[in-house]
Image (cartoon, rainbow, N blue to C red):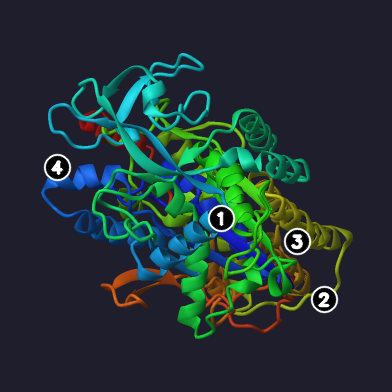
Amino acid sequence: MSHVLAAVAWPYANGPRHIGHVSGFGVPSDVFSRYMRMAGHDVLMVSGTDEHGTPIQVQADAEGVTPRELADRYNRVIVEDLHGLGLSYDLFTRTTTGNHYAVVQELFSGLLDNGYIVRKTTLGAISPSTGRTLPDRYIEGTCPICGYESARGDQCDNCGNQLDPEQLVNPRSRINGETPEFVETEHFFLDLPAFAEALATWLDARDGWRPNVLKFSRNLLADLQPRAITRDLEWGVPIPLDGWRDRNDKRIYVWFDAVIGYLSASIEWARRTGDPEAWRHWWSADGQGKDANGYYFMGKDNIVFHSVIWPALLLGYSGAGDKAGQPGRLGRLNLPTEVVSSEYLTMEGRKFSSSRRVVIYVRDFLERYDADALRYFIAAAGPESNDTDFTWAEFVRRNNDELVAGWGNLVNRSISMAAKNFGAVPEAVELTDADRELLAVAEAGFATVGDLIGRHRQKAAIGEAMRVVAEANKYLSEQAPWQLKDEASKPRMGTILHVALQVVRDANTLLTPFLPHSAQKVHELLGGTGVHAPMPSIVEVEDLDGGPGYPVLMGDYTVGAKWERVPLVAGTPLAAPKPVFRKLDPSVVDEELARLEAAE
């Protein structure tokens, strides 16, 4: 058994998340975590809502509420949506906790002590009409590097380079279009160039990463610049220094505090379990966690933060950059084992856009369709390594032709025939070559599918699992047990159905990481009892350090199926099954396209 950290990107709490978001960070991380637990690994899956920064401040001002009130609202919405999808977090928390503030400030202090954070006077943008600070993300202009006309003041989404707003050509406010004024202001900067050599050595040693992630990350090292770690903001983590911590106009910038959430959530989880040092099994580079592996899941727009900036913070805190230094009180910390980045999901040929209403939110989707239908689409046709388009026609086709007519049909007809003719799992008498071949195909799936999930090839993995389903459907059609009606043929009918049911059980285990809701149903249809696919729970907790309470996702994942064949027991009672999946009427496509058109 090894310790496996599943570090899942933090959804921003300025609104509900749409299905494009969860296709990048949500479902892939849950499939991986469920499989790794089933395979016997000690998994810690953590994340939470990212709640600081300018967008929340600006939106709260527009709505006449405080940033905390806005964050509270969407924190709960997101928790409920991720719960509905069955995402098995050990802890899904938030960044507005006393615990998170303390961990962020500890890393800030450790980096400062080791010389990797420096003070600089720079130019800050001011809105001429209001006199208020205009944050980088709310300044837009032409990128001085690639010429992209909609670059932001902190980063160009076209070429991926970090920017400062004063570098933009023809800068303008995204709030009201005015040209900002730039004035001198003092801030703290992360000395990223001091990590160029250490990051290059680390990236060169990465093996098995998706090529696009590795290439993009290496290219970023060519022109690393110091990056501001504080900003002129009212909403964020206070700067832990005398003369700064009580100021209302300076805060730690959200990009710095959000990535530290992986560590702070792990520490919060440990504190909530009653063993405050348990987090070290996944994080400590010395001792307990030296053999642990950490996998970070996100969309491709977050690669830079996880393959360059977060490793730099960990290196600097551990005293491992050009300036050396001593580890902070948390000790030397593990760097990511792999950054698992998905591409973009579009919708009906267009980029998801909440403002333009080209969107379907997770909550709305789950009100009309089953969670496993969405999980299946993301796993089988999602943006694993290429941008992918979600269309309602393809969603309905995959649901009806693959889930219902393929997997659901196999479950229903095999259990129905066994229940009708035997009332229980029949006994297998004498196996034929065809029986053995199908059983061998199913058993081989554990190694094949498991290896693919472990290497983050989930599209191929679910394809292999569904290949087992197809082979079982073919076997039933060829063996035609329904034709064996006389008493003399009944032992053969029983053998065929026993083999089919065993393969249903095997296939259900192979599909459990992808389809946990339906996997529990199939487990029970086969006469199983207890928890097969454990689910998260929404738990209302108090802040461990005296702040207001909030909802979290937690769960007991020590129970459930293992990644192995479990032989069926002849004589286990069976009842006539209920359909596992819902067939969708083709009219759904027109209805959803009409909704989309009306929203726009």
Q: Element at badge 4?
A: helix
Q: Element at badge 3?
A: helix
Instruction: Identify the residue under disc 4.
Output: 62
Q: Residues within 10 Å of mark 3 (few under 14, many from 20)?
A: many
Is 208 on the left-hand or right-hand side of 21? right
Q: Residues within 10 Å of mark 4 (few under 14, many from 20)?
A: few
- Frontmost of labels 2 and 1 is 1
Q: Quadrant of the C terminus?
A: top left
Label drawn at residue 429: 2
The percent coordinates of residue 176 (x first, y second) are: 18, 26
Instruction: Identify the residue under disc 3.
Output: 446
Instruction: Identify the residue under disc 1.
Output: 29
Q: How crowded is mark 2: few (under 14 residues within 10 Å), some or many (20 or more)?
A: few
- Frontmost of labels 4 and 1 is 4
The percent coordinates of residue 93 (x first, y second) are: 40, 65
- Frontmost of labels 3 and 2 is 3
Q: Do the residues labelled 3 and 2 touch (CB within 8 Å)?
A: no
Dot 1 or dot 3, earlier in sequence: 1
Judging depth in this view, the residue of 583 and 37 nearest the camera is 37
- Residue drawn at x 67%, y 49% as measured from the top left: 321
Is residue 513 shown above or below 374?
A: below
Q: Which amino acid does label 4 sit on?
A: Ala
Is residue 158 shown above or below 555?
A: above
Q: What residue type is labelled 3?
A: Phe
Label drawn at residue 120: none
Q: Do the residues labelled 2 and 1 touch (CB within 8 Å)?
A: no
